[in-house]
Image: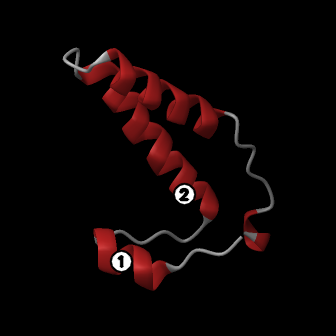
Amino acid sequence: MRINNKQLKDNTGLSFESFTNIVSYAERHLEWLKTHNKNYTKEQERRIDDLYEMIQAIDVWNDEED
């Protein structure tokens, strides 16, 4: 898996050195979304929970090969 840092930087202003860093960033942001807004609809909550669980299920190893 490769990171298209140019696309990522152009679209978000973010840059990551590894897939592990992207997963960690996404995990932290999803956890924040899960805990900081109680005005979500049930559908929004379900989608955030699903994405959070998907990120939690990713096992990242051997970062040099990402």
Rendered location of residue 29, percent (x, y): 38, 40
> What type is the residue that disc 1 sits on?
Lys
Rendered location of residue 11, percent (x, y): 31, 73
Query: By what rule are the colours in the image chosen?
Result: secondary structure
Q: Which residue is mark 2?
A: 21
Label 1 vs label 2: CA separation? Answer: 14 Å
Which one is nearer the viewer's eye here, 8 or 45? 45
Earlier along the polypeptide chain: callout 1 or callout 2? Answer: 1
The C terminus lies in which quarter of the figure?
bottom right
Q: Residue at x 36, y 77 (%)?
A: 9
Q: Residue at x 48, y 25 (%)?
A: 49
Q: Which residue is mark 1?
A: 9
Which one is nearer the viewer's eye here, 53 or 32? 53
Left or right? Give the position of 57 relative to 62. left
| Residue 35 lies in quadrant | top left
The total number of labels drawn is: 2
Of tags 1 and 2, the one toward the viewer is 1
The N terminus lies in which quarter of the figure?
bottom right
Image height of 43 relative to 57, above or below? above
Q: Secondary structure at mark 1?
A: helix
Q: Are marks 1 and 2 in contact (CB under 8 Å)?
A: no
Q: Residue at x 60, y 67 (%)?
A: 18
Q: Residue at x 43, y 85 (%)?
A: 6
